[in-house]
Image (spheres, rainbow, N blue to C red):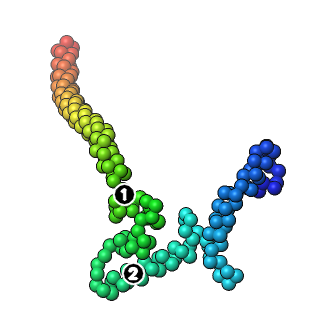
Amino acid sequence: MALHKQVSFMTDTVRAEFINKRKHPDFVKRFNQARDNRLFGQTLEKFDPGHRQGSVSTSQVVKKLGEYMEKLEEYKNKGIEINPDKVYLEVLGGKKKGKVYGLGSASQMYYKSDLTSQSTASSSTPSMISQLSSPVEELKKTAEENHNKVEESQKIASERLKYAKEFVENHEIEKATWKKEKLAMQKTFKEMASLVK
């Protein structure tokens, strides 16, 4: 943020504090280090984009990746099959400050942490499993109950459909019977009418 300009959202006191903080030796040291990192390896003939992530410059990453590719090729030429992740760790020099650059939390798959964090991790794993298994069991139970309800609803619907079909069939039979009876009655009335005349 450009502090030499007057901005509406910042009071003069806050602005003055920001300016003073930028003069502090710790800030100046970090500022200069960040600037140097961004400009590392740049010349007039060649522009280097600086950083790809974190504090490691792009040129350093390119150098490490080149070493990685050389190591992979070396193992391939010797006929040795090796996990590419292990080669990557070898090129980087292993774990530094508890981390492996570029691998993030995946580094724990290859490097065990110290005993205190191992015991914490191993003791927290069973509790995490039990915490996760309880909701899973509840979900299974709910799913089973829902399945049973669906089956029961289907059974009821099937029975109702059966009764509806029977009703329609009975209605058709009764309708046909009534029609026959009506025709018979009409015939009888005609016969009676002809007798009365």
Seen from the viewer's position, the closer of residues 93 and 86 is 93
The residue drawn where x is 68% and y is 84% is 45
Residue 80 coordinates in the image, percent (x, y):
28, 81
Seen from the viewer's position, the closer of residues 188 and 129 is 129
Name the residue that disc number 2 marks: 71
Q: Quadrant of residue 56?
A: bottom right
Q: Residues within 10 Å of mark 1 (few under 14, many from 20)?
A: some
Mark 1: which secondary structure? loop
Mark 2: which secondary structure? helix
Residue 43 coordinates in the image, percent (x, y):
67, 80
Asked if 153 appears above or below 196 in the picture, the reply is below
Asked if 95 appears above or below 144 in the picture, the reply is below
Visible residue check, residue 154? no
Residue 1 coordinates in the image, percent (x, y):
73, 55
The residue drawn where x is 82% and y is 50% is 6
Name the residue that disc number 1 marks: 113
Q: Residue furthest front?
A: 25
